[in-house]
Image (tube, rainbow, N blue to C red):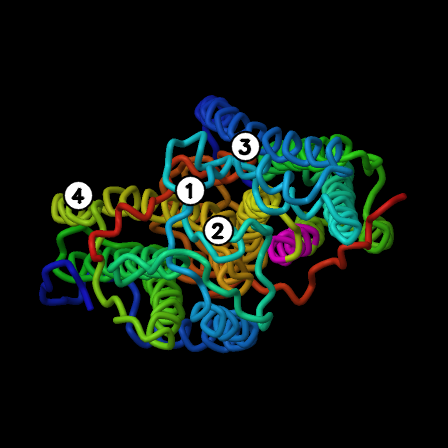
Amino acid sequence: MSIFPHRPRSAEMAISEHELSGLTRELDDLHESTFPQVRKALDELTANLGHVVAKPSTRRGFFLGAAGAVALGAAAACSGGSSGAPKPSGSAPAVPTSPPAPPETYTGDLKVVALATALENLAVSAYSGALQKAGAGQLGTVPPAVATFIQTAMKQHSDHAQAWNAVLAKAGKPTINDAPLSITQDQVNMLNAATSVPDVAKLALNLENVAAQTYTFATANVTDVGGIMTAATIQPVETMHAAILNFILGQYPIPDSFIGIGNSLKPDMLTVK
Amino acid sequence: MQNKIDEGRFRELLEESDDLQSDAMRTARTGLNDYVEAAREACVSAGRDASRWGTVAAAAGVAGGVMLLSSPTAWAAAGDDVAALQTAAGLENLAVLTYQTALTLPFVGGSSANPVVKAFATKTMGQHSEHAMAFNAAVQRLGGKPQTGSDPKYAEVVKAAVPKLKGAADVIGLAITLEDVAAQTYVKDVGLVTTAELRQLFASVAGVESQHKAILLAVQALVKANQPQLIALPPDIAKLPAAAGSVGFPDSFYPTTMAAPVEEGAIR
């Protein structure tokens, strides 16, 4: 899947496919050791999502209120006047007391899941497009470390997208295999205009920061503990990508003491209903 | 280590970073204040009728966790929140002490130190200090005692390691352990604390600790490869080994198996 135009690859990259495959295998081994925890969280999320009432929240979240944003992930627990604390996975389903759900496909926590899936797909496409441009010699010589970074980050974003899509599929919703976001066209334009490794690194850095902030936002606005934990385990990975990209760009790698939410994607930036 | 840094440019980068950081800190403080304000209001009104609570809280836009505070079981939950914050502060205090100690060593803070490593240790120490202040501010505003000591379990680890620190690689290895434990703890705490605002606070800090770990892993790889001259800002990216591009983020999902228990650094 790529939202960017495909271009023929050439031998411009300074790292062999064999080397990349070896690195990817090693990472896969490491990844396998952590994925079971995430799979458990995702399974719990899927089980609970069937019980989430698809009603937009009317309460003003503190952070959202400050940002003037619409609250996400309203749950039966909130609309019923009880706690907004994480709903324990495996707990008894909440009884809907609200009017019927609006006709949107993705509502409540599932809207956040859809948003995250689209954002991960956008990141995969951006890195894939960068590799294609590199292969076509359109970025100059790509240093081995940059090539490895792109391959590895792309694989991890693909893992994230697959995880979120599995939730959508199990919830009976259409999976999202592209990037239906209001920011996508701008990112495509930026990648098309990129002519160097720093151009691509800046684009990627922006996407990683947006992803990290979106997941930070999600931890406070998803209602299911499985969904909260999935967002919580992905967010640090995106911030790590950002740190390495800052280093590659010659910038201080950890500029902030706290990850903010000012640049997080909001649900209304998802363009699919 | 070979000095390959433009110190003037590096200072500029640090200043720019400080400006950005101040903006982020303001956001975090706002969030923290909101959380604390909500929790305090809950405490003051704890004896009121629960249904009135729901109305007040909803009208004020208070997160659901606040409503939890109006019942006896809710106080237990709030206690866990305080314990989690105290444990976090203990981990942060230990990190500050460890970097402080490391900076007294010649190969981290002295004449033979790589300036990038020295600047990183200094800046990172400051960031941990801010995290400790944020966690302790929340503890105090919630009526708990601030944790001014260090996490007991990892304080022993540091105590045992310090006499054996013979080079930058030893310090980096120790720092990676502390950063990783902190990040894993906060990731896990996101799923344990009772309010949206605290979840966001823990996530906000977890993302930064994991960044520390990422850079330390990359630096460790260069030191182990006997290429410390490549630890520079800006780096000579053409010369960086391929693995330097990926060694900093080994997992697709951040693990939590090494997370410190909520009570580990709690005080009564």
Image mark 2: chain: A
Q: Which mark is residue A58?
A: 1
The quarter in which the C terminus of chain A is drawn is bottom left
Task: Determine if the magenta segment contains residue B115.
Answer: no
Tally of marks: 4
> Within 10 angstroms of label 3, few (less than 14), some, or many (20 or more) residues?
some
| Amino acid bearing label 3 | Ala
How much space separates mark 2 and mark 4, taking CA atoms?
37 Å
| Amino acid bearing label 1 | Thr
How much space separates mark 2 and mark 1, taking CA atoms?
8 Å
Q: Residue at x 43, y 53 (%)?
A: A73
Residue A263 is situated, as x and y percent measured from the top left of the image, at 37, 38
How much space separates mark 3 and mark 2, taking CA atoms?
14 Å
Residue picked out by circle 2: A79
Residue picked out by circle 4: A186
How much space separates mark 3 and mark 1, taking CA atoms?
11 Å
| Secondary structure of residue under mark 2 | helix
Mark 3 or mark 4: which is in front? 3
